[in-house]
Amino acid sequence: MLTLGDLPGPFVTAIAVALGLVFGSFLNVVIYRLPRGESLSHPPSRCPGCGRAIRIYDNIPVLGWLLLRGRARCCKIRISARYPLIEALGGLIAWAIVRAIIFELPDETVWWKVVLLFALYLALALGLLAASFIDLDHMYLPDPITIGGALLGLLSVPLRGGTFQDALLGAAVGFLLVWLPFDFLYSKLRGLPGMGLGDAKLVMLAGAWFGWQGAVFALLAGAVQATLVALAVFVARGRIDEPEAVVRERRELQALLESSEGDARAELEREIARDPLAFEPEAGLGKARLAFGPFLALATVEYLLFGEVIVQALFS
């Protein structure tokens, strides 16, 4: 039977990177449509300016954007550089998974296991990438990615060589690490949650894949990296702005409240009282709002690629 040792390294790398680029292109659809509750499969991708369907050859990852010089072919509207960036990150992540994980497998690993492991880890990393950009735009982490990713981690334990006990313990520890101090206790003291449940579910995902060590690393390394970035942004700009979508959604919510009456208004007021994003942040670095999901996701990917080194360094 065909094994990893029979597969040419450059061929495996080229196929992996191509898949990463293609699925990275699909991530752009996920990042835009999932927070809006739109279908991910229908309609086909359309120009944001004039609404025309985008031609297949203009949708080639990275290359299509470069050939069009960052403008739509149909109406010449400028296309954000974030689209090819996400596609390129998909290819880079796929390359890193092959180099750091797949090529470290024994040469006698059968081909189907190689394919499944690559697909699992690529799905994890791309899901984290999508969650990061959604959180940057909306300060919101969707359950299909966080809870779905955690379930995928639990179901794939036998293939990845772990145990269900470690995965379940890691998921529980990951959730409680965030929920207990930053949501439950903080809300009792301040009346508002300090961190959203989305962050707790994302650390739970890390624990389901990599055990309690992975959950602890994701939270601590994510917090350190988030602090450094927040300080750098605050020093450079003197403030940390909320995403435009969050500001717009707050204005829409306030307008809806002003137009509501009776029981509908009372229910809306209760919902607003439970939502920290419904209120403008107070001035100062300590009160600024920064999407934490991207840093948790980054730390989880770091553990994915360098987990053995991290375990030896921190948990020996």
Image (cartoon, helix red, strand yellow):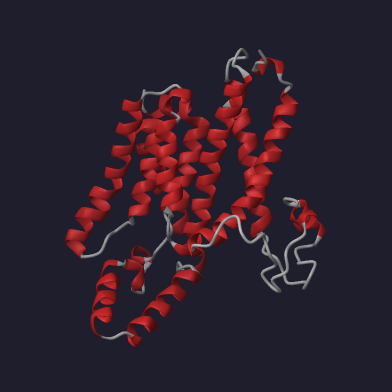
| Screen quadrant of the N terminus | top right
Which x, y percent locates residue 14?
Answer: 73, 33
Q: Residue furthest left?
A: 188
Q: Nearer the viewer, residue 125 or 282?
A: 125
> In the rendered image of this protein, does residue 183 appear above or below residue 111?
below
Q: Nearer the viewer, residue 194 or 90?
A: 90
Q: Position of residue 124 (x, y in %)?
A: 51, 40
* Drawn side of residue 129 relative to residue 230, left or right: right
Relative side of 172 to 210, left or right: left
| Above or below, 236 relative to 203 | below
Q: Residue at x 42, y 59 (%)?
A: 140
Is residue 226 shown left or right of residue 164?
A: right
In this view, the residue in front, 90 or 253, is: 253
Residue 280: quadrant of the picture? bottom left
How many numbered marks have been drawn onto this rendered protein structure?
Answer: 0
- Give the quarter of the image for residue 5: top right
Split into 4 quadrants, where in the image is the C terminus?
Answer: top left
Is residue 232 visible in the rendered structure shown here?
no
Is residue 282 or residue 207 the one in the foreground? Answer: 207
Position of residue 166 measured from the top left corner of the image (x, y, whole percent): 33, 27
Q: Residue at x 40, y 75 (%)?
A: 250
Residue drawn at the location 72% of the way across and 50% of the way down: 61
Q: Is residue 17 above or below residue 267?
A: above
Identify the residue shown where x is 63% and y is 45%.
90
